[in-house]
Image (cartoon, rainbow, N blue to C red):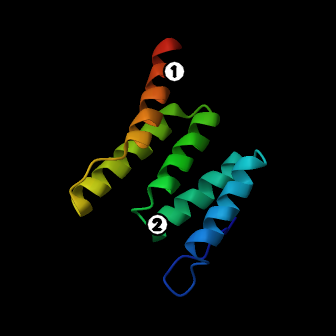
Amino acid sequence: MNILVTGTAGFIGYHTAKRLCEYWKQTGHHENAVECFQRSIEVDDLAEDFYQDLMTCYWQLGRRADALSIYERYKETVSTKLGVEPSAEANRLRKAIVSEMNSNT
């Protein structure tokens, strides 16, 4: 499924992409939401909310390792490009996922 057209001229815009991704997420179409958030990150790799939403989708799909991988990818991106750490909100999401993983083992 080609949800978004990537590239500067073809990208549908941040807010439209966000609404589309949120639609998929809220209607329980998490696989479509995952693809949408992934494509959005390809266009704007500093949009933390896309990463957090992608992490949440993976978590809801039971793919906790993938969710944590996305966190690490975002952490590396903002560290390299901006010299900062992920937000407290992103860290809380990561900790919640790790906590759930630990309680299920």
> Residue at 56% of width from left, 48% of height from top?
53
Task: Identify which residue is drawn at 45% across, 16% down.
Answer: 102
Look at mark 2 in the image and give the residue it sits on: 42
Secondary element at tag 1 = helix
Give above or below for 8 relative to 56.
below
Residue 33 horizontal side relative to residue 88, left or right:
right
Q: Residue 92 occupies which quadrant of the picture?
A: top left
Q: Quadrant of the N terminus?
A: bottom right
Residue at the image position 50 percent from the left and 80 percent from the top: 7
State left or right for residue 40 relative to residue 84: right
Say above or below: 99 vs 94: above
The residue at 43%/46% (across/down) is 70
Helix, strand or loop at mark 2: helix
Q: Residue 40, how many percent across, how many down? A: 53, 65
* N-term-proximal mark, 1 vs 2: 2
Q: Nearer the viewer, residue 91 or 37?
A: 91
Q: How far apart, in angstroms, are the residues tagged by discs 1 and 2?
A: 28 Å
Q: Amino acid at mark 2?
A: Glu
- From the top left corner, tell me how far across and down residue 99 is, in percent: 46, 20
User: What number is the disc on residue 28?
Assistant: none
On the image, numbered disc 1 is attached to which residue? Answer: 100
Say which of 89 and 104 sits in front: 89
- Residue 104 in sight here: yes
| Count of marks overlaid on the render | 2
**Mark toward the viewer: 1 or 2:** 1
Q: Position of residue 71 (x, y in %)?
A: 40, 43
